[in-house]
Amino acid sequence: LVSALMLAKNGIMVRIIDKNGCFHVGSRGFGIQPRIFELFEVLGINDELQKLATPIPTMRAYKLPGGTIPVKTWDLYERGDVWPDRPYVRGACLGQDLLEGVLREHLAKYGVTVEVGKGVTALHQSDDSVIASITTFYGDLLIGSDGARVGSTRKLLNLTFEGETQDADGMVWGDVQIKGLTSDYWHIWGKPGEFTPEGDKFGIGITGLNFDPTELGDPAKAVEFIRNRSSVWRMDVALIFQVCEFIAVTVLSLCSSLHRPNMRMVNKFQEGRAFVVGDSAHVHPPRGGQGMNCIYRTRGFNLACKLAWVGKRGNPSLLATYHGERLPVITQMLRATTKLYTHTSASESGWLKWCHSALEMYGINYRFSSIVLDERDIRPKDTEDMLAHAYSGYEGRGSLCAGDRAPDAPRLTTNNGETTLYKLLKPDAHTILVFGDADISQLSAVGSTNSRVFVVRSPGEDASLNEFEELVDGDDWAHRAYLAKPNDRLVVVIRPDTYIGALFTEGKGVTGYLARLGS
């Protein structure tokens, strides 16, 4: 849905099919990392989603037996500091069903609806098209996002799905609506797990080795298991929980699903004109809140913007860079989340805490990419080092290179008033920032390439005499974020997926860079 909205905003016709006969109900992948809110800003849906999202609650564990005395209260994630270049520093809870509902509403504005009850049964490709048997559908390109278990597109493309499944482990996750239990905390009795309160709705997790997770995928059996096995919860036949002595908890509804820890990835993300994304391409243990967030990044922005470039202006060779840019990132992400799964307890007391700074996803970068250019960084490239840092990035080193996330900047004044940089970024255009007195005489033709040029100046600088819109950098936050010192000449090209595509000292390199992309 994210990919479809990105493409629709680029004027590309899309068709979405869903093998399921109806839209799913339940939170499922509910953790949203801070970086993803920036991307939602570019799509124009962030304000709406912020109203639906809830902060990640503080975790509270209780002493057993008994279960009423709190023994520890802590944050699942370390609290970061808000900086002007990254206004979102804490993740949030947002049910996947709520997010998908918002995306469907926005897609409807472009005449795009999801066709349920339809799946792909066969694929045939030529040099310039893909034929998918639904009934039969002809298209220029195809994205398969049909999950790890089904994976029809992956299987039809004969891609391998290498890795392992830990059959000895199992988890049952579900959404349960409860009356009588406060949602101010994520309550933990026994071993820590994942929970998602939303008013009187809670996530409930059953993890460990001494049970049959397949059997507990049945909600009725899950309720019976909780009633019979837990020393904390006692339930009568009317589904009334009594937490220890005094907290009456009424279970109104319960839906659950089975999960077995998988660490797998395809051998390649593309075959001809067909692509696999999300769980169809890679799957990892439910640790760190990375799954859905990587999907938003992968198919929603990285792949979609490349499909839009090719769909509008040619240069099909760009499609190969989807695999080239995403493979190193996903490889490192799988290692990080697998490590979190096998050794989650990082504090002295052993309570679950996710402290990997890369989880916020600000560090993800494409410095190693074949389609980024950097005139400012002339040092020899260490390819192995860049690939090793594709996911974690170079936090704290004070550097900014082509391929990095474009930093945000507040207090920018335009002809229409004060704004932030990310509110100016568009999913269908490159954004070009000009600092200092860089020669931009050759950028006049850029407007015809769906690119937007802004001249950034400090409040005390004289207005420039050119055709481009100016941004007055109120507190010089943009200059600081982009390491543009006084008298520096700098031209920054920001891709539609919010990454820096190129850094130049003059404007003459921009037209050549955009020509390479087919823009």
Image (spheres, rainbow, N blue to C red):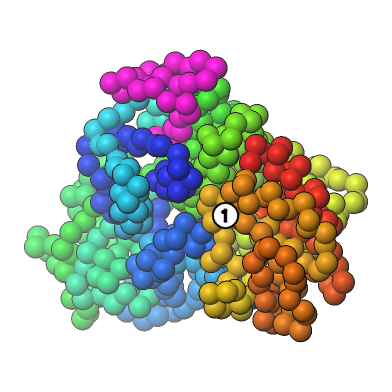
**Which residue occupies the foreground of this view, 34 or 355?**
34
Amino acid type of the residue that numbered disc 1 sits on in the rendered structure: Leu
Evaluate whether residue 313 shows in this view. Answer: yes
Q: Residue drawn 40% across and 80% down? A: 70
**Which residue occupies the foreground of this view, 261 or 138?**
138
Q: Residue 161: image x %, image y %?
A: 52, 29
Q: Residue furthest right?
A: 379
Q: Residue drawn 48% across and 17% down? A: 125
Is residue 108 depicted above or below 356 in this figure?
above
In the rendered image, the quadrant that contains the C terminus is top right
**Viewed as shown, does residue 451 lie left or right of 400?**
left
**Which contiguous range is marked in magenta?**
122-149
Quarter residue 455 falls in:
bottom right
Q: Residue 410: image x %, image y %?
A: 61, 75
Evaluate whether residue 374 shows in this view. Answer: no
**Viewed as shown, does residue 143 lie left or right of 230?**
right
Q: Residue drawn 55% across and 22% down? A: 272
Is residue 300 depicted above or below 177 in this figure?
above
Crowding near pointer 1: few (<14 within 10 Å), some, many (20+)? Answer: many
Q: Which residue is mark 1?
A: 340
Q: Residue 277: image x %, image y %?
A: 49, 37
Q: Residue drawn 32% across and 74% down? A: 183
Number of callouts: 1
Secondary structure category for the residue under label 1: helix
Q: Does 286 appear in magenta?
A: no
Q: Residue 299: image x %, image y %?
A: 50, 43
Q: Residue furthest left?
A: 238
